[in-house]
Amino acid sequence: MTCWHPNCFAFQVTTPNERDRPNSTVMFLPFPDQARSVQDSIALGRVQLCLRLRLVRTGLACICVTSVLLTKDACIGACVVFVAASLGWPWLAKTWVMRSRDQGLVEIRCLLIDSVLGGAAVALMQFNLLPSALLTVMLASDKVIVGGWNLMLRGLLVQVAACVVTLAIHGVAFAPQTSVFQMLVTLPMLIGYPLAVSVFGCRLLDGRAFRSHRSRPMVPADEPSSG
């Protein structure tokens, strides 16, 4: 006799040889629609991770880059434009991603736009060594998380192109020296961003493990005989 359970997709089988064991329950893997839902939730979790990391990264980078620009007597207009772009872009990217049908593709495009802003910042900072290197590493780590080495290389090419365009517009200047003050304003980005990646990545992995546990098939569970 077979009896379907509407919630857990289990069935119970009783055979004449198993009269002492009246119930034998087997759990099936989820149906294709349920498996697809699990995959979609994993993809959504990765998109949410990128959105949160973008908020943290742009906030920390804005503090660092703006401080470096002010120490180099940069144009106030350039500082205002960069601050406005850094603070407004994460929310614009979030709206764009959440309203799109293919969130993964749009998130990749947003990551490449992040590289555009990073390349412009490196050029405006006149290739200040520590902030420029740290900003480049931060942008590269996001690409590796989402799309691997290929996306990271694409991001580096986009960043170099944006840096060249910014130099053509703003003028070529090269001052790689990093002062003690510039090192200090770089510390929040140096410490805070790796911690944010660790925390958000741990939450994503925990959620994925939970969903994997829920979709894992159960072994037959036999009830002990009462005799």
Image (cartoon, helix red, strand yellow):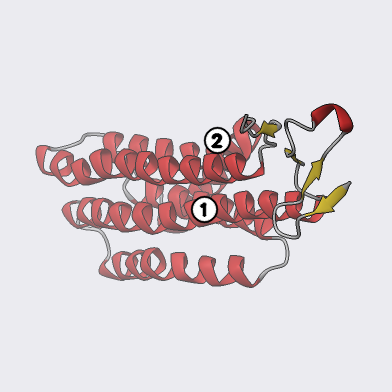
In terms of depth relative to the viewer, which is nearer, 57 or 31? 31
Amino acid type of disc 2? Val
Is 66 placed left or right of 138 in the picture? left
Amino acid type of disc 1? Val
Q: Residue at x 66, y 60 (%)?
A: 103
User: Which type of secondary structure does the marked residue at label 1 adopt?
Assistant: helix
Residue 225 seen from this side? yes
Q: Which residue is drawn at 79% across and 33% down?
A: 19
Q: Which residue is drawn at 46% across and 48% down?
A: 119
Q: Is residue 50 above or below residue 184?
A: below
Q: Mark 1 points at which residue?
A: 116
Give residue 120's position: percent from left, percent from top: 44, 53
In terms of depth relative to the viewer, which is nearer, 98 or 206? 206
How far apart are labels 1 and 2 at the CA level?
17 Å
Give residue 1's position: percent from left, percent from top: 89, 46
Residue 98 location, quadrant:
bottom right
In terms of depth relative to the viewer, which is nearer, 195 or 19? 19
Is 145 placed left or right of 84 in the picture? right
Give residue 48's position: percent from left, percent from top: 51, 57
Residue 131 location, quadrant:
top left
Sort mark 1 into few (<14), some (14-19) or many (20+) by Cα contacts within 10 Å.
many
Is 167 placed left or right of 19 in the picture? left
Name the mark nearer the viewer: 1 or 2: 2
Which of pointers 1 and 2 lies earlier in the amino acid sequence? Answer: 1
Q: Mark 2 points at which residue?
A: 144
User: Which type of secondary structure does the marked residue at label 2 adopt?
Assistant: helix
Is 15 placed left or right of 154 in the picture? right
Query: Which circle marks residue 130 in the picture?
Result: none
Give residue 49's position: percent from left, percent from top: 48, 51
Residue 73 location, quadrant:
bottom left
Q: Residue at x 76, y 51 (%)?
A: 9
